[in-house]
Image (cartoon, grey):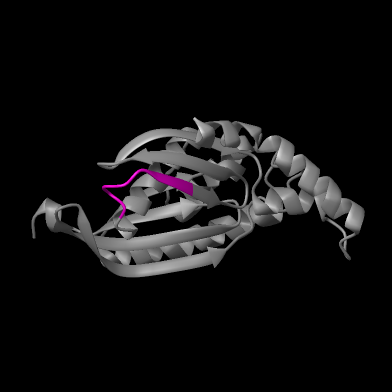
Amino acid sequence: MTDQEAPLAAIDLGTNSFHLVVARPTGNNRFDILDREKEVVRLGSGSGDMKRLAPDAMDRGISALTRFRRLVDAAGAELHAVATSAVREAENRDEFLDRARDEAGVTVEVVSGVEEARLIHLGVLQAVPVYDERILVIDIGGGSVEFIIGAAGGEFVEARSLKLGAIRMTERFFADEPVRKRDLAEARRYIRAALTPAVRLVAD
């Protein structure tokens, strides 16, 4: 087996869920999926607008990473793990990153919002036949929403990463049940105002 044929593994540490994909390159930038796993960790839950990762959320995250690490090792795959909004913004992110390395054996790269958007764009090009088209991609995550413009030929043109993710909005506006009409109206006003940079991006 050559290095090119060795399996690769990727872990996406999202604000709501963690995803693992193990795949084998087949040439021409294509892959055969060997394993795919998802755990709803809610890493950003209870963190106070993503300022800190809650202890129970960190425990759930480490548990998921430990399980994923075992699957990666069983496949003999090379691993690359990236974290997005919840870890990126947390004041205590180093504590979580140290635990991920020491307890789960996973070294995690924290990516910027723009780099997150670039990786999303690459994923879309792998999954959807839009390589020769100009595209707008909207990715709604737990902590952030990415708006991505891609040009024909697979070029990544520009992106905006907005702090409008599902967990973030739930914690901010809908922490208590039942949902009240005034909470819904306030959330809509906030989101409309926050979307201005994305509207300008699309209009241009």
Residue drawn at x 32%, y 62% is: 22
Indicate the quadrant where residue 50 lies: top right
Is 32 part of what is drawn in magenta?
Answer: no
Q: Which residues are magenta?
A: 130-137
**For this rendering, which residue is in front, 44 or 123?**
123
Residue drawn at x 72%, y 41% is: 192
Q: Main secondary structure of the magenta part?
A: loop
Does any portion of residue 79 appear in the rendered image? no
Query: In the image, residue 68 lies at what x, y percent?
Result: 43, 63
Q: Residue furthest front?
A: 203
Does any portion of residue 75 appear in the rendered image? yes
Query: In the image, residue 21 lies at what x, y percent?
Result: 36, 61
Residue drawn at x 47%, y 37% is: 111
Tell me how many marks there are: 0
Residue drawn at x 27%, y 49% is: 131
**For this rendering, which residue is in front, 40 or 178?**
178
